[in-house]
Image (cartoon, helix red, strand yellow):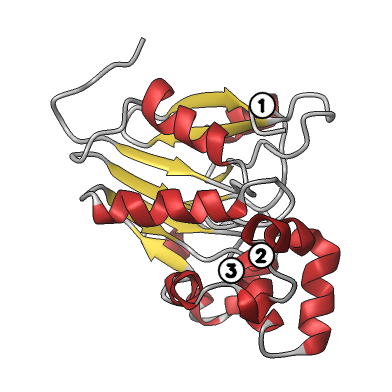
Amino acid sequence: MVHHSTHSRRFVIPDIHGCALTLDRLLFRVLGLTRRDDLYLLGDYIDRGPRSREVMDLLISLSLKGYRVRALRGNHEEMFLNGCRDRNAFRLWTLNGGLATLGSFGVGDACEVPAHYRRFMEQMPCYLVLPDFVLVHASLDLSLPDPFVNREAMLWSRSLEVRRERLGGRRVIGGHTPMTRQEIEQGLATDRIVLDNGCVYPERPGMGSLAALELDGMTLHFQENIDR
């Protein structure tokens, strides 16, 4: 049953990877998203799954319809953007699920994806600091005086290290590294929450769903992949 609340809620959703039908169902059937809610997305909207273009269309249309959406950049958006500028980067991207994105757009090259999609991705920040959490696609490099200068770590690192005192007492929420449902649930009690349930890996035990975390009640919601 869709529960429509009268107050605003905050949802975080990681790695969507071309699973547009799954995302749509999670947002509107499972969460009952309204324009009062804040929706934070942790990157990796494209690649691997079959509907990268439709995911991007959904995100753009949510913004146009007045939903409060904040979309962070993931390493797959980064690979796509670099792939238009550099042939080696293009090859790396195609080896990491980029061919599914080209197929979704019906094009043969990263530069042929329509410019407004590229602009949308170029505007995506690598992190977001909330009063109580830091949101990032991958991880933070806490060896640095300022962990927010290392973009590479924010997009690619699999480090689970976190030191709240370095982040104003905030906990870190990311995606990037597929975890089982049980691992995600156990992580909620820690300072380093990883929400990626490997939506595009339904064959892996404990994975194959898209997760959403409601921040104020720390409640998890899952939608099984319906895109495959």
At x 26%, y 35%, the residue is: 9
At x 56%, y 55%, the residue is: 53
Measured in 3D between alpha carbons, the distance from the residue under mark 3 to the one under mark 1, in whole angstroms, is 23 Å
Assign the N terminus to one quadrant of the image.
top left
Nearer the viewer's eye, disc 2 or disc 3? Answer: 2
* Amino acid identity at mark 1: Arg
Identify the residue under disc 2.
Answer: 76
Name above or below for residue 13 compared with residue 110. Answer: above
Nearer the viewer's eye, disc 1 or disc 2? Answer: 2
Assign the C terminus to one quadrant of the image.
top right
* 2 and 3 marks in contact (CB < 8 Å): no
| Crowd rating for badge 3 (residues with CA inside 10 Å; few <14, some 14–19, many 20+) | many
Q: Going from the N terminus, do you reach mark 2 or mark 3 first?
A: 2
Measured in 3D between alpha carbons, the distance from the residue under mark 1 to the one under mark 2, in whole angstroms, is 23 Å
* Amino acid identity at mark 3: Met
Name above or below for residue 3 compared with residue 120. Answer: above
| Crowd rating for badge 1 (residues with CA inside 10 Å; few <14, some 14–19, many 20+) | many
| Crowd rating for badge 2 (residues with CA inside 10 Å; few <14, some 14–19, many 20+) | many
At x 67%, y 37%, the residue is: 199
Identify the residue under disc 3.
Answer: 154
Residue 190 - label? none
Q: Position of residue 169 (x, y in %)?
A: 38, 55
Q: Going from the N terminus, do you reach mark 3 or mark 1 first?
A: 3
* Amino acid identity at mark 2: His
Kindly state the secondary structure of the residue where label 1 is placed. helix
